Amino acid sequence: QLQLVESGGGLVQPGGSLRLSCAVSGFALDDYAIAWFRQAPEMEREGLLCISRSGGKTLYAGSVKGRFTISRDKAKNTVYLQMNSLKPEDTAVYYCAAEPLDNYCSGYFPDFGSWGQGTQVTVSS
């Protein structure tokens, strides 16, 4: 059974950093693309970054360029989202998602069939 569990969210001051984790089980990272999305209240779910089965990384949200990075640790079956220089507008629920895409990535949420429960990130002073 596929399972994704996000952790690492919380309250952080503007300019601060957080690292989110997405622990996966029931499948290998070599077989699935993993993407990070976020959703603020009354907003559509936004694709941020994706890492493909082969480890290729793609950025989808220009608003996080140079501040957010995606990485994975196959030994730990975990994908990370490192978020630096956080801004109040980064406040949202953050989700990781998985799909056995054939060695490509996507930032379009309907392309992903398996999702975690989400973790809240609040950026505020």
Image: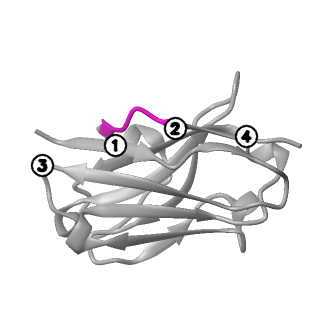
Is 22 situated left or right of 123 in this image? left
For marks 3 and 2, the one nearer the N-term is: 3
Disc marking residue 26? 3
Real-space CA distance between mark 2 and mark 1, rounded to the nearest whole angstrom: 9 Å
For marks 4 and 3, the one nearer the N-term is: 3
Dot 2 falls on a residue whose secondary structure is strand
Colouring: one colour
Real-space CA distance between mark 3 and mark 2, rounded to the nearest whole angstrom: 21 Å
The stretch in magenta equals 114-119
User: Residue 60 magenta-drawn?
Assistant: no
Disc 4: which residue: 91
Q: Nearer the viewer, mark 3 or mark 2?
A: 2
Q: Amino acid at mark 1?
A: Val
Disc 1: which residue: 5
Dot 3 falls on a residue whose secondary structure is loop
Q: Amino acid at mark 4?
A: Thr
Relative to 112, does residue 16 appear above or below in the rendering? below
Q: Position of residue 59 (x, y in %)?
A: 58, 67
Disc marking residue 119? 2
Real-space CA distance between mark 4 and mark 3, rounded to the nearest whole angstrom: 30 Å
Q: Position of residue 7 (x, y in %)?
A: 45, 46
Real-space CA distance between mark 4 and mark 1, rounded to the nearest whole angstrom: 19 Å
Q: Amino acid at mark 3?
A: Gly
